[in-house]
Image (cartoon, helix red, strand yellow):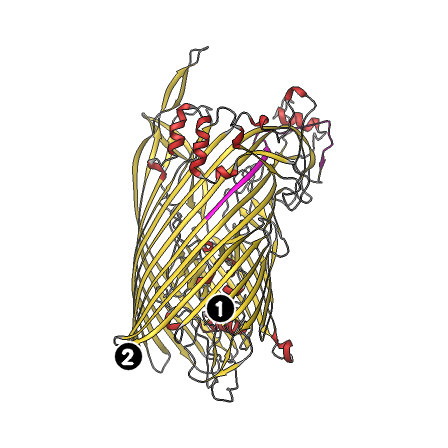
Amino acid sequence: MVTGNGLIARGARARLSLTASATALLLAGAPAHAQTREGSPPTAQQPGTGSGVTAPSGDQGTVDPNSGNSDASGGDIVVTGVRASLSSAQGIKRNADQIVDSIVAEDIGKLPDRNVAEALQRITGIQIQRSFGEGSSIAIRGLSQVRTEINGRDVFTANNGRTLSLEDVPSELLAGVDVYKNPSANLIEGGIGGLVNLRTRKPFDFDGFKLSASATANYYDLYDGTKPQANLLVSDRWQTGVGEIGVLLDVAYQETAFRQDQISSQPFYLLNDQLNASGQPVNATDYATAQGLGRLGQPTYLSHGVGIGQYLGDRRRLGIDAAVQWRPTDTIDVTAEYVRSDYKFRYGDYSFFAYTGDNPITPDFTQPFTYDSEGNFRSGTFVNVPINANTSLEQRHSVTNDYSLNAKWRPSDRLTINGDFQYIRGVTDGQRSIVILASTAERLTTSVGSGVPSMIISPDSDPANGNGLVSDPANYASGAGYLDHIEHSVGTEYAGRLDAEYKIDGGFLKSLAGGLRYTDRSAVTDSSTYQYYGLTRALSPDLYEQRLFRGDLYRGFQDVPTSAVFFNRDTVLDYGATRQALAPFVDPSQQAALLAGVGYAPSDRNTQGEKTYTAYGVARFGSGGAVPIDGNIGVRLIKTKVSTAGFVGSSPRVQTGTDAITGAPIYGNGPITFNPVNVDSDYTKALPSLNLAFHFTDKLQLRLAASKALTRPGFDQLNPNITIFENNPTNGQRTATSGNADLRPLTADQLDASLEYYFSRTGSIYAAGFYKKVDGFIATITAPETYSFNGVDYVYQVTRPVNGDDGKIKGFEVGGNTFLDFLPGWLSGFGAQANFTYVDSKAPSPDAQDTSGAQLTVPLEQLSKYSYNLIGFYDRGPLSARVAYNWRSKYVVTTRGNGSGNLPIFNDARGQLDASVTLTVTPNFGLTVDGTNLTNTENRTYYGVASRPQSSVLNDRRVSITARLTY
């Protein structure tokens, strides 16, 4: 994997053409030695000149200013393989108007990376989140508010958000990826963290006919299965009577599998053994527990159980890129393109938990207990702990269709005009269903805190309680149920823009550019409530399944039950068959509803509309002198109109019966009345930017940048739906949950500096610093609100997102890369790349609390303070090899985790080793073997402090064999 430090042509130098073409994505093992050829070099590679303008794919090569000697033959030096990747990436960084890092095509195709998020983890300042062992999302310099584009245009997954799920895109479809870490006025607004632009290939990137194909077999060791992968690119161009025409079709298909094994301890709760003023226990149960454990007067934190999770699933990706280019004259280029991302995700799991939730857990006082020095539970035995044995299905199918038309006209050598139109439509469907079986752990012996938690369940000594075996279906005869949930999202957008740039010869001012952009976007999301169906009697024997744990789970771990009983997983994987199978076992009053499937209430729909009107202007300038300076200054003006529609549901209290003994009325919830709510808002923002580059020498430059960026709230955060229930059977605090249609966008004032030294065509070192002050961080809080029923006012504690205080993010990046060209012979094929990032953050976290409810200060979610990459590679002749190690320090997963007792959950430090080896058998054929997670990395999380572990997780190691053919 190679990321970027760029190149810029200055003065009279030889030109070095780097053929990091689209072929490099498929023919990963191209030779790395220098060659020569005659003819003019292709256009220098640049990142997108402006969002919404079709940019070069980046495969054509780069003019290298670092070579001081021209080719003796007068032709161009052509470098292929990893060297071309590294040099092309350097070229993008150094030539860009902003601070940019890039990955060129070969990097994505050649490393063991199956999606864009996996590839981006190698770039300085980027940290990725993993879902079931695979990269799923990213943060840039500590902020997850990242804008995604394809070829400089909007792209999104229809899932209540604004961006593309990076795991949806097969990496083979792309020519390159550019990461903009600071904006300029010509870039589309929307990411205070940064911008990720995915670049596809175009037919005019190639000299003529091009055919590339690859086939891969991927083996997953924990899953113990093999899945296929393939890619086909066909492109050609012709001279016709109406001008030159090019056509390209690129299809990428992937099937992947995964298994994730997890063993978890439940939240740690502090025993309250205090006495009140009269000498009585404040909490009698906790006092008795502390007394029985001999812990009175000492802090004691007991974990409320332990559990197993085993997830088995698969992913399928289909990507299509079809492009047609037409050049009727030398001054006009027209490009029409269709990009399709089709992603399916599914898993069925076995979840086995013995836990009490918020309720007290009862120790077996006859057995030994151990604690650490702070009173955290380490080992012991508990009695009569409730068990849930759950089998579930989760699946998502997301399809995004992107249609675009771009025309570029150069009426003169100075003036360039771009027109661009886009229509994009995304649809996502999802289900989540859970079959719950219930039992009891008569005796639960567990240890936590040192290695993987243990979970030993055994019978008690009372035969009247049954045999106490979790492998006996008879012990799951009561307390079962079924949860059902569905989602459907549709997002569309029309976007159009017009851009112009006028170049000015001589003087300080180099060019003036400006443009207009209009978008009309809609997002409609239906998300059902979780409907519960109680199973009133034991299931038939054919619906049960024994699942082996001991010796199989967690690569042979022994301290777990031998097996447990679950609802049949094969049935669960069929959503309709599950409901059919369970219908005979629910109450007759629920059978029809179960068979029909859960539906949508009016308040389950969140409808958003958004229109934006944008204008920008940019002036580019430069001057000579002892220290040449160039740069740009500009401003982007945006007016945003938002329309939000939803419902306020209200359920009055109604009498549902009479107590047979006391005669007192019994109350329940009445029918829900839905009243529509519509909220319209608009805001106008100005986003200025300044980018400067000081060229101290031909090899050393300093960038300084100041800018303002913007991120709009997610559509789920703007959701106005709320349902209020008057009935309050516990006489406790009334509560409700909603979004907030009045949220304003987040804005960030940014300062950036980057010192870059380029000492060869594949060698550079750099150091960058950054500071962001974010206004309006969105935080979820609970506050009182008043609602009325029949003229009576009630106060509810309503949880909803609000714009909070300012946040600050600061840090620095350092890195470098080089080939060891000074070494003799084959040793010159070795190279290395390394980078390190430090990010510190301060942001409001009103939900972060410990078990006593005390406020905690935590950094931004998903942000590691430290991260680094170490990459070694070899590329000479027919052999190419790379080893990449990625590491990040601990980070906050969530400030208030679901099922964690509202404790923040931290992810421990984690590193992963990946590698690949390619042999170029012939100029047209190569073989690659690659692997991920080669060190079998364990992922661990904990509650607040490391002495309170939450989970230990193992994922697959993957080994792949790929054959690539290119003509």
Q: Amino acid at mark 1?
A: Leu
Residue 1 lies in quadrant:
bottom right
* Tag 1 near tag 2, CB within 8 Å: no
Residue 855, compared with residue 211, is above or below; it is above
Q: Residue at x 48, y 38 (%)?
A: 572
In the image, residue 561 above or below residue 504: above
Name the element at disc 1: strand
Q: Residue 719's x, y, as percent? A: 37, 43
Residue 943 appears anywhere in the view: no
- The residue segment tinted magenta is 345-370
Position of 941 compared to 38: left or right?
Answer: right
Q: Residue at x 40, y 20 (%)?
A: 667
Q: Residues within 10 Å of mark 2 (few under 14, many from 20)?
A: few
State the residue position of label 2.
412
> Which of the 4 image quadrants contains residue 499?
bottom left
Look at the image and tell me whether residue 829 can be seen.
yes
Q: Work out whether residue 72 or residue 121 is closer to the camera in this orientation and state it.
A: 72
Numbered tag placed on residue 965 in the rendering: 1
Q: Position of residue 360 (x, y in %)?
A: 60, 29
- The total of numbered circles placed on residues is 2
Label 2 element class: loop
Q: Based on the picture, tell me whether residue 532 belongs to the magenta stretch.
A: no
384 shown above or below 4: above
Residue 869 location, quadrant: bottom right
Instruction: Specify the amino acid type for callout 2.
Output: Ser
